[in-house]
Image (tube, rainbow, N blue to C red):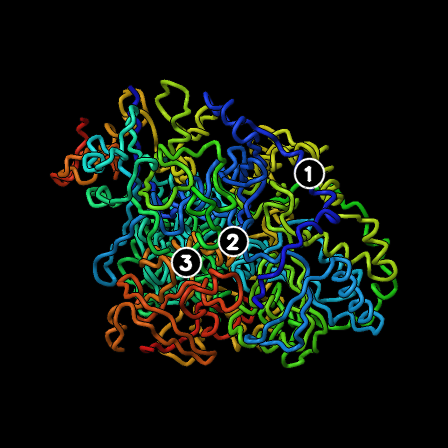
């Protein structure tokens, strides 16, 4: 029996619906302007069209969507005109959300596995069960573990968390139940390299928010701005404005390893050797200093105003008076003085004149933003690359400036309905679990002391039994057998542990599940979601069900609460008091009563109606080297240095630290684990990346516009447009430079074998002059062997099977783009 | 008389394909059967490579060759300037597909681009050749204009979202998604386009945005040599100096 071909038990949802069913009816009903045909239309179809304000689920951006439902049928999704990210627009994934709802391969009820054997070729033999049986099964396991003092052997791993009513509940569950492994997030498999780079330099462990609309120069390192960078939809709105309407037109330089649409649309595209973005950033910084292009009002200056930064020559640090940066002259002496464009050409393969031109443009055009994501830092030297690039923002004074970058404020949520501290029993407070390390060794000296999460280590560590074996693992919106590097290890690891998957869809991880507790799809959910870093000012979206659940599924947040209610003792009492996620969301909305949004949202009901609460402006701005707070009318209230330290530069010095105090604090551990020089490791310095795998070509696996974090894998329409740049309209291709192909006897369209120490895959190739000769580019999307009917039918292996599991020791960032492979004709 | 037309600003287009997917969902198209598409090209040798793209809907020609060749008059031009197919008259001979210089017409019963065939996943019910659960409201369907789920054996094409634009308030110059009064009457591709690379309006109205953009930024039509006179214009920068022969904004 196929995983997905189970009988529908739609009736059962009637017993479990409650809250969301009632809510669906409160969504606004808007009669479409049907003109002359109104009467006829209503006569023929009887139903008015209802527009529900919800939010998209296909990437982290949280675009507001208007969901059109007529006669109980969802038939269209458009961007919400009243939503600040969407502004009535969508990316190519947005309209396809309807497929997600009506995917015929969805799980249709809770299920249990009846085949105890697990493996790729083992049919799980899932059979439908009731929610009560499913939830009680989980609770019984968890109660038994807790009774034995082994509650740490339960882990809950999540990927795309949304808000307080789902991922926000997890930490409390871990605290009350007693497991350091609840939750383990996926941020190390996302872009923690960026978060740590910012934490180390400006003290904010966060992605940045950006003011692109007022920016005049964009320098982008590997973020796929016009394919995948969040918020994609808004990025493109910005692009149309800054490139087609704004005066002056914003100039753009984009850096990547292959010619994608971002590089093609930019003024300058630089094709860089993988892992060397830091060297390019260092050379740009070198030019900014030697040519005197730095922003003196922010950075400071030589006391006598004479620029002494000359290539190869040290300066007296005492002669330079730093303003908002720390360690600039030291950095120059220890590193930057030798990082000339000529030197960088040797490292990056980018021609010296291109580096010089980029540096001069970036250094002389204000405001300017240097942004980067995984391409730049998913390497062993990622922290260095990230710090070097982010320091460019400091050199040109863009931090907290108009047209620069800042950090995201949180929404004015009300308090949770129940205070969990009153429900901490003795075990929760002092149980044996408190002494256990996390299974992923995050925060542990033997593992990744400074990382935020290490999801990619959970499978391998369980397999080794180090630090221990898990008993039960639950997954929420993550599919690590597929998404983790070298997922083959996870296939082994999940054989001897009780696996609970909560995805609405079949997947590789679900194929190894013992229990399936399917979530609603997003058009059926009531779910809060504060904004991802956007423009700084706070915003909280609400996913409002457009339609009653089609099947016997349950919102993950409620699944967790229902499990909690079945945990013995005070934990169970807490969850009984908490009630359900709608109660949580109603309490969150109470915060808006005291702090109404700009759109008038001041209650749960108005939040449901509008789908979003937001409040402009951002509260702080740096103007000409001075910081000001919004006083209600303007950025006019001067901020003291202490204010800046408390709110904006949360570093030991209260400045932007080129000499990182955070790294200095951990200097012994970093030096021991990385072999780095204690005199240099706290600065952004150049370090050759380590490329595992044993091959001669870099394997880079970017996301395409249709990737949707894998949630589009079973959408036929997305498959049809997967990789249009090289003609991938029903499959993915590995892009290979014609010179590289010819040397190996490979022709366009051949099936090729890609091999590394991790494994081997076969995929069809496309010869493409836009890809570096030393690099293979294979988008991370297909190669599914479990999942829906369309996803499994796409030809080609999965890049993860040839990707070695290596991480940046400092950031914990999974090094997705650094494995070296060989390629040959299959 | 209204003459609907479109302007696509290539300086703003990011090649994201949102126009394509929005069209496909609004009009219930099969995967890979792109009434609206974006075509990608690359040329040159590493590291000097050019990657470019062209968004391409139906051109809704002033002088459409598809209408001229149709033996049953199934393909017709509306009074407001839109080329449609009457599925009640179409015999599926595909002459129009051969005659069209832009390759924007589609025959229903071809082999599926994406397997398994979505038509098998959502089988039809008599007149409809397939029946996706998300299909447009019954009241919007109009086989005489090629709108909705088509029957077997017919040719289909972009309608400029005729079920939307034909209900627009009379006499408006622009169908602009930013205007609440015209949002629901704006073609799906235009409405969704994030960088706002698309504009839709009345080419016969000198006050319309499309008319102004065509003049100000030098609108170009594809394959002028065919004499088809498309009602879709492209902008690519708007500077006065151009390569001779690459620009025409003559109206019929």
Do the residues indicated by labels 3 and 2 lie within the same chain of the protein? yes
In the rendering, at what x and y percent does residue A110 appear?
A: 68, 59
**Mark 3 — residue?**
A222
Which marked residue is nearer to the observer: mark 1 or mark 2?
Answer: 1
Label 2 lies in what chain? A
In the rendering, at what x and y percent does residue B109 appear?
A: 34, 50
Is A250 displayed left or right of A567 in the figure? left
Q: CA distance from mark 1 to mark 2?
A: 51 Å
Q: Outermost residue, front direction? A: B126
**Residue A188 appears in the picture as rendered:** no
Element assignment for label 2 = strand
Q: Image quarter for residue B200?
A: top left
In the rendering, at what x and y percent does residue A382 appear?
A: 48, 66
- What label does residue A23 carry, if any? 1
Lower position in the chain sequence, tag 1 or tag 3: 1
Q: Nearer the viewer, residue A193 or A308?
A: A193
Q: Nearer the viewer, residue B136 or B46?
A: B136
Q: Nearer the viewer, residue A227 or A401?
A: A227
Task: Give the answer, above or below, for where B39 lies relative to A469.
Answer: above
Q: Outermost residue, left direction? A: B244
Q: Are marks 1 and 3 in contact (CB under 8 Å)?
A: no
Query: Residue at image x 51%, y 40%?
Result: A75
Label 1 lies in what chain? A
**Image quadrant where one finds the C terminus of chain A:** bottom left
Query: Residue at image x 41%, y 57%?
Result: A221
Lower position in the chain sequence, tag 3 or tag 2: 3
**Mark 2 — residue?**
A325
Which marked residue is nearer to the observer: mark 1 or mark 3?
Answer: 1
């Amino acid at each position: 029996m196929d995983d997905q071909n189970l009988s529908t038990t739609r009736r059962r949802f009637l017993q479990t619906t409650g809250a969301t069913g009632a809510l669906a009816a409160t969504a606004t009903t808007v009669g479409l302007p049907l003109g002359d045909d109104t009467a006829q239309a209503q006569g023929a179809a009887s139903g008015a069209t209802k527009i529900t304000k919800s939010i998209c689920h296909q990437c982290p951006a949280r675009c507001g969507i208007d969901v059109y439902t007529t006669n109980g049928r969802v038939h269209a999704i458009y961007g919400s005109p009243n939503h600040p990210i969407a502004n009535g627009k969508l990316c190519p994934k947005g309209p396809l959300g309807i497929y997600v709802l009506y995917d015929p391969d969805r799980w249709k009820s809770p299920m249990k596995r009846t085949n105890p054997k697990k493996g790729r070729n083992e049919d799980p033999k899932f059979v439908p069960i009731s929610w009560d049986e499913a939830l009680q099964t989980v609770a019984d396991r968890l109660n038994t573990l807790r009774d034995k003092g082994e509650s740490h052997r339960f882990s809950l791993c999540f990927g795309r968390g949304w808000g307080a009513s789902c991922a926000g509940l997890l930490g409390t569950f871990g605290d009350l139940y007693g497991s350091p492994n609840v939750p383990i997030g996926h941020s190390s498999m996302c872009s923690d390299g960026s978060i740590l780079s910012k934490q180390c330099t400006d003290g904010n462990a966060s992605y940045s928010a950006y003011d692109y609309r007022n920016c005049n120069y964009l320098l982008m390192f590997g973020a796929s701005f016009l394919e995948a960078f969040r918020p994609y939809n808004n990025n493109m709105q910005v692009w149309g404005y800054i490139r087609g309407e704004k005066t002056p037109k914003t100039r753009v330089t984009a850096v990547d390893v292959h010619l994608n649409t971002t590089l093609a649309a930019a003024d300058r595209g630089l094709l860089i050797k993988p892992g060397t973005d830091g060297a390019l950033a260092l050379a740009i910084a070198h030019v900014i200093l030697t040519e005197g292009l730095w922003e003196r009002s922010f950075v400071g200056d030589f006391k006598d105003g004479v620029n002494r930064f000359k290539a190869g020559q040290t300066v007296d640090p005492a002669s330079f008076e730093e303003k908002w940066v720390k360690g600039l002259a030291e950095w120059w002496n220890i590193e930057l003085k030798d990082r000339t464009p000529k030197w960088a050409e040797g490292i990056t393969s980018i021609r010296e004149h291109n580096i010089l031109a980029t540096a001069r443009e970036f250094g002389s055009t204000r405001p300017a933003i240097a942004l980067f994501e995984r391409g730049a830092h998913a390497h062993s030297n990622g922290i260095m690359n990230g710090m070097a690039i982010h320091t460019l923002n400091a050199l040109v004074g863009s931090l907290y400036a108009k047209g620069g970058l800042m950090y995201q404020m949180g929404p004015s949520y009300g308090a949770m309905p129940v205070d969990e501290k009153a429900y901490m029993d003795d075990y929760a407070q002092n149980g044996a679990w408190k002494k256990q390390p996390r299974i992923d060794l995050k925060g542990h000296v033997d593992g990744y002391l400074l990382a935020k999460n290490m999801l990619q280590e959970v499978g391998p560590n369980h397999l080794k039994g180090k630090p221990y074996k898990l008993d039960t693992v639950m997954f929420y919106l993550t599919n690590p057998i597929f998404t983790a590097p070298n997922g083959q290890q996870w296939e082994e690891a999940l054989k001897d542990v009780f696996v609970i998957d909560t995805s609405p869809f079949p997947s590789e991880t679900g194929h190894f599940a013992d229990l399936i507790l399917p979530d609603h799809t997003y058009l059926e959910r009531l779910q809060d979601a504060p904004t991802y870093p956007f423009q700084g000012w706070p915003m909280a979206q609400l996913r409002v069900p457009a339609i009653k659940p089609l099947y016997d599924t349950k919102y993950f947040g409620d699944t967790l609460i229902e499990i909690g209610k079945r945990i013995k003792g005070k934990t169970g009492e807490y969850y009984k008091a908490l009630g359900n996620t709608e109660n949580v969301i109603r309490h969150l909305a109470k915060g808006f009563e005291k702090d109404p949004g700009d759109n008038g949202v001041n209650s749960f009901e108005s939040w449901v109606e509008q789908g979003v609460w937001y409040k402009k402006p951002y509260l702080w701005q740096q103007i000409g080297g001075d910081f000001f707070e919004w006083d209600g009318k303007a950025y006019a209230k001067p901020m003291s240095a202490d204010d800046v330290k408390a709110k904006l530069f949360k570093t030991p010095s209260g400045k932007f630290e080129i000499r990182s105090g955070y790294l200095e604090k951990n200097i012994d551990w970093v030096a021991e684990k990385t072999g780095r020089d204690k005199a240099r490791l706290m600065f952004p310095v150049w370090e050759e990346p380590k490329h595992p795998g044993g091959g001669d070509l870099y394997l880079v696996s970017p996301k395409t516009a249709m990737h949707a974090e894998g949630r589009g894998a079973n959408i036929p329409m997305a498959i049809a447009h997967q990789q249009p740049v090289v003609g991938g309209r029903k499959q993915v291709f590995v892009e290979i430079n014609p010179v590289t192909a010819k040397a190996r006897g490979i022709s366009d369209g051949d099936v090729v074998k890609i091999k590394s120490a991790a494994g081997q895959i076969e995929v069809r190739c496309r010869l493409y002059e836009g890809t570096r000769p030393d690099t293979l580019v294979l988008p991370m999307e297909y190669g599914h062997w479990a999942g829906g009917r369309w996803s499994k039918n796409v030809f080609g292996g999965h890049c993860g099977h040839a990707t070695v599991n290596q991480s940046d020791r400092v950031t914990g960032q999974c090094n997705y783009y650094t494995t070296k492979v060989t390629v040959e004709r299959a | 008389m209204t003459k609907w037309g479109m302007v696509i600003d290539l300086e703003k287009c990011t090649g994201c394909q949102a126009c394509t997917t929005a069209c496909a969902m609004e009009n219930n198209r099969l995967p890979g059967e792109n009434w609206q598409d974006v075509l990608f090209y690359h040329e040159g040798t590493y590291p000097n490579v050019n990657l470019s793209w062209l968004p391409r809907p139906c051109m809704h020609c002033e002088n459409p060759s598809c209408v001229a060749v149709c033996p049953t008059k199934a393909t017709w031009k509306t009074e407001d300037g839109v080329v449609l197919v009457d599925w009640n008259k179409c015999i599926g001979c595909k002459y129009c597909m051969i005659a069209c210089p832009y390759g924007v017409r589609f025959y229903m019963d071809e082999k599926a681009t994406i397997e398994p065939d979505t038509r098998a996943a959502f089988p039809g019910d008599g007149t409809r050749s397939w029946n996706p659960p998300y299909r447009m409201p019954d009241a919007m369907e109009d086989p005489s204009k090629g709108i909705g789920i088509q029957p077997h054996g017919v040719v289909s094409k972009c309608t400029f979202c005729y079920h939307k634009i034909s209900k627009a308030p009379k006499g408006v110059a622009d169908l602009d998604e930013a205007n609440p009064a015209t949002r629901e009457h704006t073609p799906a591709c235009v409405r969704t386009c994030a960088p706002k690379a698309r504009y839709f309006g009345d080419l016969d109205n000198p006050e319309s945005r499309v008319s102004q953009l065509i003049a100000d930024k030098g609108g170009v039509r594809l394959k002028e040599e065919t004499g088809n006179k498309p009602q879709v214009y492209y902008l690519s920068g708007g500077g006065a100096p151009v390569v001779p022969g690459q620009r025409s904004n003559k109206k019929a």
